[in-house]
Amino acid sequence: MQPAAFFDLDRTLLTGASGPTFSTMLKRVGLLPDRSIPGEGLVFKFFDVVGETIPSMMATRQMARAASGWERTRVQEAGRLAAAQLIDEVPGFAKSLIEHHHDEGRKVIMATTSPYDLVKPLADALGLDDVIATRYGVADGHYDGSIDGLFVWGPGKLAAVRLWAQANGVDVGSSYAYSDSVYDVPLLSAVEHPTAVNPDPRLRVVAVIKRWPSQYFDVPAGVPKLVGVEPQRAIQFLARPQLFPWVRFDVDGVDHIPSEGPVIIVGNHRSYFDPLAIGWAMAQAGRPVRFLGKKEVFDAPVVGQMVTALGGIRVERGSGSDEPLKAAAEALSAGEAVAIMPQGTIPRGRAFFDPDLKGRWGAAKLAALSGAPIVPIGIWGTEKVWPRNARTPDVLAVGHPPTVRLRVGPPVDLAYDDPDVDTTAIMEALVALLPEEARIHREPTPEELAKSLPSSYKGDPDAELDRRPGSD
């Protein structure tokens, strides 16, 4: 017997309730009055925030009686109309997880209290293998006011899952289950791999006690939420000049950053402050961004948890593995913005002052793998905020704050079939966004050279002549 993956619908596969869409489509096919029901919107909003309650589920159970006399084919038509809208509301990470389970050879099943005829078209659109849902009794092509079989909620959902599993050769005990509701604890407790998705307050407590993982399908795994807001979004609310009196930002071209959909953000690397500078530009665009980061950062106490909470993507340098690119491509397929510094690390010594930027293949390979556009951001002045030889940024420069210049360019024209050619195009696009002084060969002063080296460097700065850009 094989394991399967069971997904709840509302607040799980969908971030909110499916009810408003189903109600709209039932009105469209003439089964509900074409007018708003008093308090309907408030009820759905309450469900979005709090989740299932016993009164709401009892009302759901009574819907079978309210639907008595409805023509089944018209309900199915309402389901098809709803699916065409709801499919776009399924978060990208939910779709990628479904694909992952299929790649691993597991059947993926929707298990929901909602009426079967309404949800089956959405399950089909998602490519799911089957649906376990509440079925209404039918006589002569019309609902007869009864429930045919189990009411798929709470213990009834677990019973329905077990009946389905027995008929389909599936082992529930070794399976996976995803739900937002404390009333699905019976099902979550019955499987080997339970996950609380967008958990309601009560399930959040149960998940902590039982050490179940929690997840949100509209953000990368490991990114928490507080009152529905992820940490990076909360930080972006604070991206105000008044809160950064020790640095000034000169930003232009933000309109080149798409408001939604996958995009790869690339920037030249001059300082440890560069990710914060890119984050500032992305805040002006109103989008979170996921950075690729070295494994050592993720493994560091406290800092590692913070980077994970911000949606960072772990990279093991020198492993020769494409897994980091696959993880980034998965984020892109979910519609995320992913940032990468093609130079790898900050050039040091005289390489820092070389106007010819040299990059690695990562961004080009990621673009070819995902098909996502690459938007360049030319960065200048971050080395004055946080030079390479300093352990922290200079937050005391309030009276004479340095200016960080950020220029966002249009998407880079790529061939997608030659990483050398595409990497050259990416670096040329970055250079074109830098000020004129960045494109002039000049001899750095001893002080400038010293600032371009790590604080731990004990050698002669003049010996740093021809190190490979991006080396450490």
Image (cartoon, rainbow, N blue to C red):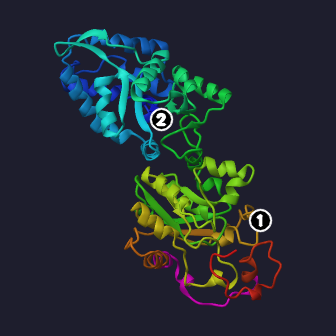
Q: Which of marks 1 and 2 is in front?
A: 2
Reply above or below: 411 against 6: below
The location of residue 303, given as percent across then percent down, is 71, 52
Label 1 or label 2, whichever comes before in sequence order: 2
Magenta stretch: residue 162 in it? Answer: no
Residue picked out by circle 1 = 391
Residue found at x 56% / y 88%? 440
Q: Residue 26 carries which label?
A: none
Name which residue type carries label 1.
Arg
The location of residue 233, given as percent across then percent down, is 55, 46
Question: How far apart are the alpha carbons under marks 1 and 2?
Answer: 53 Å
Reply above or below: 134 against 123: above
**Residue 318 relative to residue 105: left or right:** right
**Magenta span of residues:** 428-447
Residue picked out by circle 2 = 2
Dot 2 falls on a residue whose secondary structure is loop
The location of residue 29, given as percent across then percent down, is 19, 25
Dot 1 falls on a residue whose secondary structure is loop
Residue found at x 60% / y 85%? 354
Residue found at x 57% / y 64%? 321
The quarter of the displayed image where residue 72 is located: top left
Reply above or below: 237 against 390: above
Looking at the image, which is closer to me, 167 or 364? 167
The location of residue 405, given as percent across then percent down, is 56, 70
The quarter of the displayed image where residue 457 is located: bottom right
